[in-house]
Image (spheres, grey):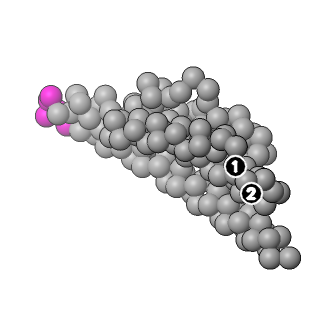
Amino acid sequence: MKKAICKALKNLKHIQNKLNTPGENGAVISVLRDVEAVTISVLESVLSFISGPEAESKSSRWSLVLKLMHQKKVMCEEEQKANKFLSAEAPVRSCIKSENMKHVENVQKELQSSELSIQDLEEGLETFSRCMIKTRVIVLNIISL
């Protein structure tokens, strides 16, 4: 899974580098490029969060996203949940090695906690996608005028 995430991050970097190449001018194109850049930054951040600190790039884009979303609360929640995925991995490995019921219970608790974190992440992404759709509609309305 981490290899796939790293590959996706590299692909996003490649797309982002394409955005920086000079092309056609125009206000609409620049707005669409800005929207695309923000989307790529958010996807990079989500993939980096899921894969853990090992796959994170040196220049994290969360600060840009937080400035755009104006939600300081998100940063606090993300800092608290940053290692939920990694903390669930260790009990699963120990459960595989031993069949102790206590280990199984610990794994179940960690997996439930991870599931809640994933649900929170999905809700945040759903909200973000709705915001992006609204922005797209606004841009398309501006273009059609």
Indicate the amino acid at tag 1: Gly
User: Which residue is painted at 67% across and 66% down in the image?
Assistant: 133
Residue 114 belongs to the span the image colors magenta: no
Among all residues in the image, which is located at the extreme right?
145
Q: Element at badge 2?
A: helix
The residue range painted magenta reads 97-102
* Label disc, if present, on residue 97 of the rendered structure: none
In the shown orientation, is residue 42 left or right of residue 53? right
Q: Position of residue 110 (x, y in %)?
A: 37, 39
Camera sees residue 49: no
Give the quarter of the figure containing the N terminus.
top left
User: Which residue is painted at 71% across and 34% down in the image?
Assistant: 63
Indicate the amino acid at tag 2: Ile
In the rendered image, the vertical position of residue 136 relative to residue 120, given as above or below: below
Q: Position of residue 103 (x, y in %)?
A: 24, 33
Q: Where does label 1 land, which residue?
A: 23
Closer mark to the observer between disc 2 and disc 1: 1
Instruction: Please report whichever mark, 2 or 1, sits nearer to the chain's N-terminal start.
Output: 1
Camera sees residue 137: yes
Residues at circles 2 and 1 in contact by the CB criterion of under 8 Å: yes
Q: Where does label 2 land, which residue?
A: 29
